[in-house]
Amino acid sequence: MSIRPVKRLVKSKPTLEGAGVHLRRAFGFGDTAETDPFLLLDDFRNERPEDYLAGFPWHPHRGIETITYVLAGTVEHGDSIGNHGAIAAGDVQWMTAGSGIIHQEMPKGDERGRMHGFQLWANLPAAFKMTKPRYQEVKAPDIPAITDDDGTQVRIVCGSFWGKRGPVDGIAADPMYIDVTVPPGKRKTLPVETTRHAFAYVFEGSGKFCNASEPLAVPTEGVGWSDTALPTEADNRSLLLFDRGDELTVQAGEHGIRFLLVSGQPLREPVAWYGPIVMNTQEQLRQAFDELQHGTFLKK
C-alpha cells in the first residue's frame, strides 16, 4: 500500500458569481490537468443573506455535470424544459447538462440566515458531450452514512466506499464523492484507487495529511510529529491535491476534521472552455454560443 503525498495545498479564494453571490473558489477556470475530470469547486457558505439572495439567474450549460451539495439552507432550481424543485440540508442534485440546458439556482438561508453548500463541475467525455440532459436529485435520508469503529463518519454521494455505494449512478467519469468526518485526535487511512485523480476540501476543523510515501510516523509525547512524516496541515477552506498512491492518511486536530474527498478517472481529452460551456474544440465552443444567439441551443 502506498500513501498519496500532498502535491499542493491552496486556500479557496473569494469571488463573485451569478447576480452577485459571494463565494469562495477552490479551483476552476485554469489548467484542468491536475483535477481532470473535475473542472471547478465552489464553496458557497455564507451567513449574510444580502451576499447570496440574488442567486444564479437563468444561464446555460453544455458539456458538463454540476453537482450541488447543500449543508444548510435551500437551493430552488428551475430549467428551460420544465423541471423545478428545491434541495435542502444534506441533499444533493447531480445535473447532467449534456447537449444543453438553461436553468437558474436561487439560494435561500435557513432560520439563522445560513446558506452552506458546494458546487462541483465534472467534465463530460467527448462521446457524452451531447447526451440528453437529466437530473438526479437525492434527499439526505437516501445518502448512505457509515460510522466506523473509531467514530469516523462517511456519507457516500457517489461511487463505492467501505462496501456501500452512493445513490448517484450512470456517471461517465465514475467519480467517488464522499463527505468525511474524523473525530478529534483520531488518525484515519482512506482508500483511493491509484489510477484516479483525487482531492480533499476541508470545511470544518483541521488536521494533518501525510505527505510521504512511507506510512505516517507516530507522534511522540512532547515532541510532536516525526520530521520524516512531513505532514501537511490543513484547516477550513483548504484544498489538497494528492499525488499518486492507493490511500491517504489524515490525523484529525483537537476539534476533529470534516472534508469532501473526491476522486475520478481522468479523461485526458482536450478542453475548450468559456464560462458555463465546456467542449473539446474551439469550433464546438463557437457553435454553442452561436446556437445560444440564434435560439437553437436547446435540443429535443
Image: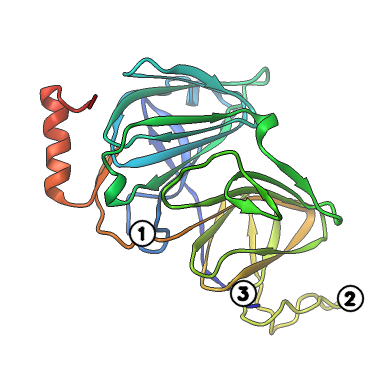
Whether the residues at callouts 1 and 2 have beta carbons within 8 Å, the answer is no
- Amino acid under label 3? Asn
Q: Is residue 174 left or right of residue 147?
A: left
Q: Position of residue 231 (x, y in %)?
A: 66, 72
Contact? badges 3 and 2 (CB < 8 Å): no
Work out which quarter of the rendered image holds the C terminus and state it. Answer: top left
- Give the percent coordinates (x, y) of residue 270: 25, 58
- Identify whether 151 is placed above or below 69: below
Q: Residue at x 11, y 47 (%)?
A: 283
- Marks 3 and 1, the one that precedes in the sequence: 3
**Gap between marks 3 and 2 measured at Cα:** 21 Å
Q: Which mark is residue 267?
A: 1
Label tally: 3
Instruction: Indicate whether 31 appears above or below 171.
Output: below
> Local crowd at mark 3 within 10 Å, few (<14), some, or many (≥20)?
many
- Residue at the image point whose x is 27% and y is 51% from the top: 126
**In this image, 185 relative to 192: left or right?**
right
* Picture quadrant of residue 246: bottom right
What is the C-alpha distance between the residues marked 3 and 1?
26 Å
Residue 221's tag is: 2
- The amino acid type of the residue labelled 1 equals Leu
Sequence-wise, the earlier of marks 3 and 2 is 3
Query: Which of the 4 image quadrants contains residue 200?
Result: bottom right
Q: Quadrant of the N terminus?
A: bottom right
Q: Is residue 111 above or below residue 285?
A: above
Tag shown at residue 229: none
User: How packed is label 1: few (under 14 Cα within 10 Å), some, or many (20 or more)?
Assistant: some
SS assignment at label 1 = loop
**Which residue in the structure is indicated by mark 3?**
211
State the residue at coordinates (40%, 55%): 37
**Mark 2 surroundings within 10 Å by alpha-carbon count, few (fewer than 14), some (14 through 19), many (20 or more):** few
